[in-house]
Image (spheres, rainbow, N blue to C red):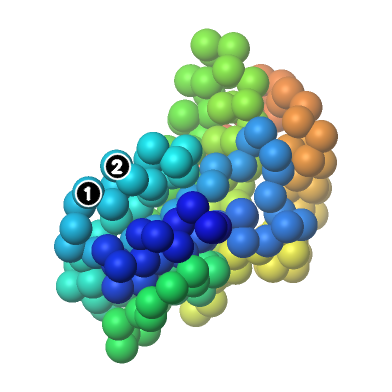
Amino acid sequence: MNDLSSLCKKAQALGFYGSYTRKEDYVEDLSDINVFALSDDKSILLDLASLGYSPVVISSKYFEEICMKGDPLCHYIYYDSDLICGEFPAVKPSINEYTCKRFANMSISSIQLSREAFLRQDEKGSLTWTFRSIRSLIQYISCLGGSIPFSNSQIKEKCLSLGKEVCETLYIIQEKRERLEAISASLILKVEKLVKSVIKETV
């Protein structure tokens, strides 16, 4: 974090978001260290990337636009972040049909990326994308009810409303993620079937 404080002068707001902000959810050598900056100065993107972070740099105006639109990125930055410096614009994220549809699409695309990673023997990639797929699926269903879980504990709590199969699959993937264990093709296929069946039932 000390490396980033010098960049505060370039941004209206700067901080970490995602699992890195929660010690219990962050997995060394697997989780990304996501950083966001609300700034019109695009040079900060190179600054952050050169420090080894996965950066998102957007203007404050664009941030307001995606928040009003209901984009999940706004929800992550606004609700699932630790600010290093600055403040957010006076806008609250919306939850609407667009928000939920984006989570559904993220779930579908993530399991496709998991399958591709598995085929090229990228064990960490297939594990990461499978976890993101089932997490996005649970976020999608929760979104339909007007809320969005972010932390692993919130995701576990919400999965109970989706039935035993979804929860048991989530637990297996989370355990493998914590232990950095490779997942099987059958588990990827199981998640893919769950994603398709749950989304089909709710569309």
- Which residue does the image show at 43% across and 73% down from the upper left? 85
- Which residue does the image show at 58% across and 18% down from the upper left? 122
How many numbered circles are shown?
A: 2
Query: Viewer-proximal residue, 48 or 163?
Result: 48
Residue type at mark 2: give it.
Leu
**Image quarter for residue 133?**
top right
Residue 131 higher or lower than 66, as above or below: above
Asked whether residue 143 is in view, the answer is: no
Query: Viewer-proximal residue, 120 or 24?
Result: 24
Query: Viewer-proximal residue, 159 or 182?
Result: 182
Where residue 172 appears, x then y in whole percent?
80, 40
- Which residue does the image show at 40% across and 60% down from the upper left? 6
Disc 2, disc 1: CB below 8 Å? yes
Q: Secondary structure at mark 1?
A: helix
Find the residue positioned furthest to the top.
Answer: 120
Residue 17 higher or lower than 65, as above or below: above
Q: Secondary structure at mark 2?
A: helix
**The C terminus sits in image quarter:** bottom left
Where residue 79 appears, x then y in whole percent?
50, 74
Residue type at mark 1: give it.
Ser
Residue position for label 1:
43
Where residue 99 appears, x then y in whole percent?
37, 66
**Image quarter for residue 20?**
bottom right
Tell me the tag on residue 46.
2
Where residue 86 appears, x then y in whole percent?
38, 77
